[in-house]
Image: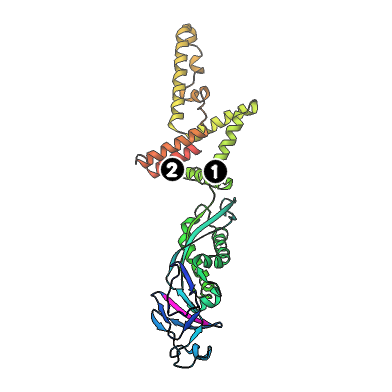
Amino acid sequence: MAIIDLVKWNGNPNLMAWKFPSEELSTWTQLIVNETQEAYLVKGGVYEGPFLAGRHTLSTKNIPLLTTLIGLPFGGQSPFSAEVWYVNKQTNMDIRWGTPDPIQLQDPQYKILVPVRAFGQYGIRISDAKKFLMKLVGTLPAFDTETIANYFKGIFMTRIKTEIANAIVKQGESILTVSTRLEDLSEMLKTSLLPNMDEYGVALSNFNIISINVPEDNPGYKKLQEALAKKTEMDIIGFNYQQERSFDVMQTAAGNEGSAGGMMGAGMGMGMGMGMGIPMGNMMGNMAGQMNMGNQQQMGQQMPPQQQMGQMPQQQMPPQQQAPQQAAPAAASYQDKIQMLKELAELKAQGILTEEEFAAQKKQILG
């Protein structure tokens, strides 16, 4: 093969390391190194360099390797064989990663098992070119970012899964809210991975978790979303799960056929009516009393005078005392209570009710 007079980078710009295709050099060969690059002369596993940006002549005057290892006469012009390696030290910011399989985790707040996935990207640069060539590149003709990503994939996935699991399981962060900690988790992972990268002469410029998510069609995730929506609704109207369940049970019992169900329905109606104490209940009682008085007066007009002047005054009771016996307030359903609470909340938001008035009315409605 012909002796090469000029050696320069002809590799792909995405490569991190590239070997010049010919090894037939001479002591008059010119070596060109661009900015953001370093070059090494390699013979028998011995690395001579680095050659930094500029033009270099491969002579025995400035390369001890040529006289000690190759045995060329000092100051002479002779051909020799050696490898020339270039290392690209420019930062690559767009290496993407993702968990190949979901992480099965139990949400610490809702106790539901869901599959969690994570995605992101990171950036690297070669911090120690000689260490990088010796420990990672070896005898490969080229080394790109994809090859680096494959080398560190196992380490990355282990650390990523561990840190996400710690955040969710050990630190009690719900899967629904763990995305609010992406910045903290990214910084923790970067710090954790730096020693492993540095061992091979690679620096981790940045590490970002872009997304931690659960497949939308996962049944467990759907249950979590429904639970969160329900809790939000209850928090807005000042209702809790125990109260909701107790009303559901009472409604179910009141709807059952038979005397037990009827008694439960009547009891629930009376209890709610007495506990609510709202203007609607008072209005119903007053209306019932007025109707009773009207009926008694009509009956009095039809009776003989002797009976009108007889025992009627002793048997008649004031309408206010008869009203509870004549008409019991209607039982308020769970949906009615929810609607009334929503209306109270709107009145409070508009400034019509004070906080104390809202709390008192809510207490009466919930009993």
Residue in the image at 56% along x and 82% along y: 45
Is residue 59 rendered magenta in the image?
no
**Looking at the picture, how far across and down is residue 115, in whole percent?**
58, 52
Q: Name the one closer to the observer, 203 or 277.
A: 203
Describe the element under mark 2 as helix, strand or loop. helix
Using the rendered image of the protein, determine whether residue 188 is visible from the camera's viewpoint. no
Residue in the image at 56% along x and 52% along y: 109
**Looking at the picture, how far across and down is residue 285, in whole percent?**
46, 25
**The label number, if any, that marks residue 241 in the structure image:** 1
Q: Quick one: which residue is furthest to the bottom in this view?
A: 74
**Looking at the picture, how far across and down is residue 117, in whole percent?**
54, 55
Residue in the image at 44% along x and 9% along y: 301
The stretch of residues the image draws in magenta is: 37-42
* Label whose residue precedes the other's in the sequence (2 or 1): 1
Q: Which residue is mark 2?
A: 359
Q: Name the one closer to the observer, 121 or 367.
A: 121
Describe the element under mark 1 as helix, strand or loop. helix
Q: Name the one closer to the observer, 23 or 363.
A: 23
Residue in the image at 44% along x and 13% along y: 297
* Residue type highlighted by circle 2: Ala
* Residue type highlighted by circle 1: Tyr
